[in-house]
């Protein structure tokens, strides 16, 4: 019996020693990680709020991208990246954009690199960029070759408002202006919070049902996982396609059965006459005459770029939707 008790005491003692050893290791590891993070932050931002180079950022592909010096020549391979660069006051450093970058107006005079995909490597190299701001998705297949050619490229792929703010900060940090990125995001966040505060007092029963459509006979509408769906919900609306995923093809009967209170048609900038024609086309769709939005003339034509691009103007789109839904 004494031997048994002695064995137990030895076992317990060993267990306590091992536990203390493991706890010590965990604590030291956490401390080490904190010190590394502090060193990275100090190295990249410095004590005077100026970025120090070289710096490393982790882009949307999980790739650690090292920017060797403050970029002076920037190329954007997506309209959303171009808008963010200009919103941050970096327009003068942009030397190349795609054929589809159309905002702001000042961007139209910048050299074009061609299509969004496949990327024109020869054109990009000829512009001698310090940094290329690329986009994920269908452009991902082009990035490895771009990097093989010695081009520093950061890939961005924001899928929602939170990601968009993250992209803004990432671009600002990589370009040496982290404070401007934080300021822009803070200002946008205040506007979003203001809308959220207003919507919080509106009961679900008072939130209108929304249909996002188009002029084509084939109807595609945004569901869960899209920027549009997120903005509709934030603005205090109920997307009739919220039960679907991403952009889905639906039939006219789906819309008629859902009975939306408001119909929104996102399209390019149009004059009053063109907008009237579109509203007439929507109103005369077969089987839609009893839809509340049709009966009450609640059809709105909006600028599609405010809802499709992950850019600061998404907040303008959010404010517009709230106005349409509740004012």
Image (cartoon, rainbow, N blue to C red):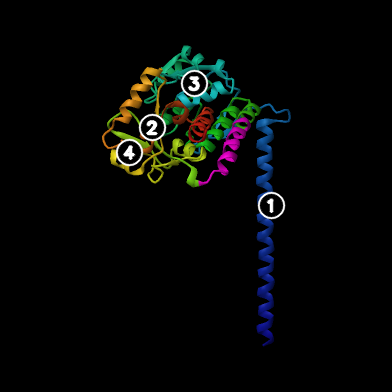
The residue that disc 2 covers is: 138
Q: Secondary structure at mark 4?
A: loop
The residue that disc 3 covers is: 75
In the image: residue 178, left or right of residue 149: right
Of discs 4 and 1, which sits in the foreground? 4
Disc 3 from disc 4: Cα separation: 50 Å
Disc 3 from disc 2: Cα separation: 18 Å
Disc 2 from disc 1: Cα separation: 43 Å
In x, y percent, where is residue 31? Answer: 69, 48
Discs 2, 4 touching: Cβ within 8 Å: no
Q: Earlier in the sequence, mark 3 or mark 2?
A: 3
The residue nearer to you, when weighing 173 against 149, is 173
In the image: residue 260, left or right of residue 202: left
The residue that disc 4 covers is: 290
The residue nearer to you, when weighing 135 against 231, is 231
Report crowding for label 4: few under 14, some 14 to 19, many 20 or more residues within 10 A (C-alpha): few
In x, y percent, where is residue 81? Answer: 50, 26
Of discs 2 and 4, which sits in the foreground? 4
The residue that disc 1 covers is: 28
Q: Earlier in the sequence, mark 2 or mark 1?
A: 1
Q: Residue at x 47, y 11 (%)?
A: 109
Discs 3, 1 touching: Cβ within 8 Å: no
Q: Earlier in the sequence, mark 3 or mark 4?
A: 3
| Residue, far right | 47
Q: Main secondary structure of the magenta part?
A: helix
Q: Which residues are magenta?
A: 186-203
Q: Earlier in the sequence, mark 4 or mark 1?
A: 1
In x, y percent, where is residue 45? Answer: 67, 31
Report crowding for label 2: few under 14, some 14 to 19, many 20 or more residues within 10 A (C-alpha): few
């Amino acid at each position: 019996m004494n031997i048994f008790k002695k064995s137990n005491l030895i076992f317990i003692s060993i267990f306590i020693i091992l536990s203390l050893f493991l706890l010590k290791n965990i604590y030291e590891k956490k401390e080490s990680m904190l010190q590394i993070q502090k060193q990275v932050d100090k190295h990249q931002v410095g004590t005077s709020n100026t970025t120090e180079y070289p710096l490393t950022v982790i882009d949307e592909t999980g790739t650690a991208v090292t920017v060797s010096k403050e970029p002076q020549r920037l190329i954007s391979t997506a309209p959303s990246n171009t808008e963010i660069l200009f919103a941050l006051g970096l327009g003068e450093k942009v030397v190349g954009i795609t054929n589809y970058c159309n905002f702001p107006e000042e961007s139209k005079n910048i050299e074009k690199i061609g299509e969004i995909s496949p990327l024109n490597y020869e054109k990009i190299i000829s512009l001698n960029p310090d940094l290329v701001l690329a986009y994920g998705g269908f452009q991902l297949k082009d990035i490895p070759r771009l990097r093989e050619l010695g081009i520093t490229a950061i890939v961005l792929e924001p899928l929602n408002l939170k990601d968009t703010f993250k992209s803004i900060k990432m671009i600002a940090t990589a370009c040496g202006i982290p404070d401007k990125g934080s300021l822009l995001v803070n200002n946008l966040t205040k506007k979003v919070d203001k809308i959220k505060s207003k919507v919080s007092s509106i009961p679900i029963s008072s939130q209108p049902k929304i249909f996002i459509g188009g002029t084509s006979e084939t109807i595609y509408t945004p569901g869960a996982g899209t920027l549009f769906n997120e903005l509709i919900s934030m603005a205090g609306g109920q997307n009739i396609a919220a039960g679907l995923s991403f952009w889905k093809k639906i039939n006219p009967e789906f819309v008629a059965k859902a009975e939306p209170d408001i119909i929104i048609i996102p399209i390019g900038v149009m004059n009053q006459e063109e907008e009237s024609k579109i509203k007439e086309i929507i109103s005369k769709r077969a089987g839609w005459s009893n839809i509340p939005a049709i009966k009450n003339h609640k059809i709105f034509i909006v600028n599609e770029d405010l809802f499709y691009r992950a850019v600061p103007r998404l907040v303008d789109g959010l404010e517009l939707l709230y106005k349409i839904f509740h004012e």
